[in-house]
Image (cartoon, rainbow, N blue to C red):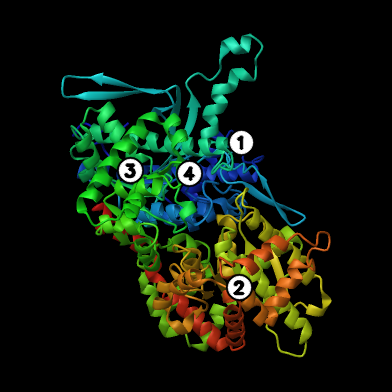
Amino acid sequence: MIDRLSNEKIPSAAPRESSSEVLAQEIIERLTYRIGKDPKVAKPHDWLTAAILVVRDRITDNWMESTRKTYATDAKRVYYLSLEFLIGRLMRDAVTNIGLMDELRQALASFGVDIDVIAALEPDAALGNGGLGRLAACFMESMATVDIPAYGYGIRYVHGLFRQQMADGWQVELPETWLAHGNPWEFERRESSYEIGFGGSVETVNVDEEVTRYVWKPAERVIATACDTPVVGWRAKRVNTLRLWTAHPIDPILLDAFNAGDHIGALRESNKAESLARVLYPADATPAGQELRLRQEFFFSSASLQDILRRHLQQYPDFTSLADKVAIQLNDTHPAVSVAELVRLLTDVHGMDFEAAWDIARHTFSYTNHTLLPEALETWPVPLFERLLPRHMQIVYAINAKILLEARKQKVHTDQEVRNISLIDESGDRRVRMGNLAFVGSHSINGVSALHTELMKETVFADLHRLYPTRINNKTNGITPRRWLMQCNPDLVTLIREAIGDEFMDNTEALQALDAFADKPDFQEKFARIKRSNKVKLAQLVQSRMGIRLDPSAMFDIQIKRIHEYKRQLLNIVEAISLYDQIRSHPELDWVPRVKLFAGKAAPSYHNAKLIIKLANDVAKVINNDPSVRGLLKIVFIPNYNVSLAEIMVPAADLSEQISTAGMEASGTGNMKFALNGALTIGTLDGANVEMRDWVGEENIKIFGMTADEVTKVRAEGHNPRAIIEQSRELSQALFAISSGVFSPDDRNRFTALIDGIYNHDWFMVAADFDAYTKAQREVDAIWAEPASWYSKTIRNTARMGWFSSDRTIRQYAGEIWRAG
């Protein structure tokens, strides 16, 4: 164990040998003594676990050395609080980053084991929903890569996000059982356990005539215990920690109740505690669901903060240096309650006065906003918040008083603006605004693309921005090139290395040198061959899972992301129906063969999103079985989208669909992954698409539709979608086909309400952008018909995407927000 409080130097472990023979011996040792299997009877999952344990042990050496270095250099630590970490499978990621892939492949092959086969058995860690969680995972890997001492904090969900299956085209949610057989990557830290309270009352204690202390007496208590997963950076420069909390009751069983015959009731406290880490995003359509969601957010926030303060006091005498030695990043509003919790811990537990605690909190926290949707900026009913967190409610009111008095003092804010600034929304039932709490409690508030950041200033945080005009800044998202190029597209990496050398592997912006090869026929031919190989791999997956045969020579047109009306999968489906009609009506034309592939999950309570999934499957059933289409168009919805599926779909994409309603997508990172892997983007000027256009060049991306300003103007002036629909023959016919039951003969009214929404308000501008989208798609067809032009553009997409690395993003956070590294 490291003695973190002494100055005595602890010797580092000797470097391990890494030959394939040594690794083979270590694999047999782990198989025999850690798993208890004779190699002669070992199953593929046994070999996987043995290989992971060997790799984990190598990483652990670097992990401990990284920790020692942080203490020795007195480095500032970054703590990234996120309700999601969509880390996916870790084996290939870890092996690549420590540079052992070839040796481990050879070691396993010596036993007749294929590393690719066993790696595919590793379950995806179901700890996230989509872009928010995947970004957090990329950031953790990049913080280790650029040598930033960091901890990620979240919840160790037993089931995480649901597993998606299809029943007659409808989404069915099933438990995701990624932890069913344990997790060989993690280490339980029983010593890192903290009590978390809920409910109860607050007592006042008069210390003396001038000092009053408040003591929270929770009615319920649970134990949060840490489980640590090492996160290794590129070339193993640093290993950081992903610390996830699991929940346990104070008393696992109520023996009196059990002995009295109430065997179910005796486990009440256990079930209540364990529900905190049971499922990611429990449905919050009911009061019970809302309460569980708030409990989860406070549970992991409080445990994380207690852990941070405990670690700080191990090294420093008090908390006056906290903001100098600690940076806490709030990833969206989910951990926003941390602002009030840190103030409570500093005042009630550690005896600081409120003003000093508030000052430390504001200089320690920073907040990343990921959405402009008001409904996604969490708010909690005051009665619920006050009942569950009574002391925190007092602190929120105290903070609010300071902020509102400050706003009044400036004498430039109207009454309505002051109401907008308030931490309490009083427009209906009183609710605590978590976005406002995160804003006022942070010294930095960042958006995740240039457009999104400017819109934050103009919309959701306009009045807070006027009060604190220097706090909002931009940090455009990025992706880790290790997972999203080197691992998921190794053949392309080999081709790039042959062309421009290895510099891009350490500095992604060096990919720019690939520009010189974009118009060379021999390079285009090799690039095209790799793309086709990736498409064959995806086609084989679709054939094996769904029994649908795909032609790899067709254009693979892919939209993969969370199902939401603003992401406009519906626009894509309606255009597919229009194309279907045209192909049947004009068989004499030279149509481009196209496969439209969809994947993504809808929130369990989001009715329209589930309808869109059903519509995609209903349309697929008709089009894919219509002989008059002659295989020129196919629709495929692949169930259970996750990181591992994305790693197959992204390299196979010819066309990347990034078609959200302008002004509604904060950034997007799928757009970056596709372009980096040589796909052409069709998209609106939304989120990071704007900056992607600037980097790849207008001629190498297909932009269509209204801008964010135009959308705002149309909504303000009164949008008349019915008139637009009636003037567009293709759109009106496609919508009529859907609403009249052409694709749902078993229930002709199934999609009537969905289509009525387009006719009556079209909030997401499906009708408004349809003609522009259709025109852009036919222009894409024209580019596809000229392979030299197509590959020139797609190669340049790969060449010019280096700036969108999460390494660059993290360096900006570290230099401009955290002051770390």
Viewer-side residue, 67 vs 8? 67
Q: Earlier in the sequence, mark 2 or mark 3?
A: 3
Q: Earlier in the sequence, mark 1 or mark 4?
A: 1
Disc 2, disc 4: CB below 8 Å?
A: no
Quarter of the image that includes the N terminus: top left
Q: In the rendering, at what x and y percent does residue 199 appear?
A: 44, 26
Residue for badge 3 = 14
Q: Earlier in the sequence, mark 2 or mark 4?
A: 4
Q: Earlier in the sequence, mark 1 or mark 3?
A: 3
Kind of residue at disc 3: Ala
Residue for badge 1 = 37
Q: Do we see residue 654 in this rendering?
A: no
Asked if residue 23 lies left or right of residue 342, the reply is right
The CA distance from mark 2 to mark 4 is 61 Å
Residue for badge 2 = 721
Kind of residue at disc 1: Lys
Kind of residue at disc 2: Pro
Residue for badge 4 = 54
Total numbered badges shown on the rendered structure: 4
Label 3, secondary structure: give it.
loop
The CA distance from mark 2 to mark 3 is 70 Å
Label 1, secondary structure: give it.
loop
In the rendered image, the vertical position of residue 704 relative to residue 340, given as above or below: below
User: Residue at position x 25%, y 50% from top?
Assistant: 407
Viewer-side residue, 117 vs 362? 362
Label 4, secondary structure: give it.
helix
Asked if residue 710 lies left or right of residue 756, the reply is left
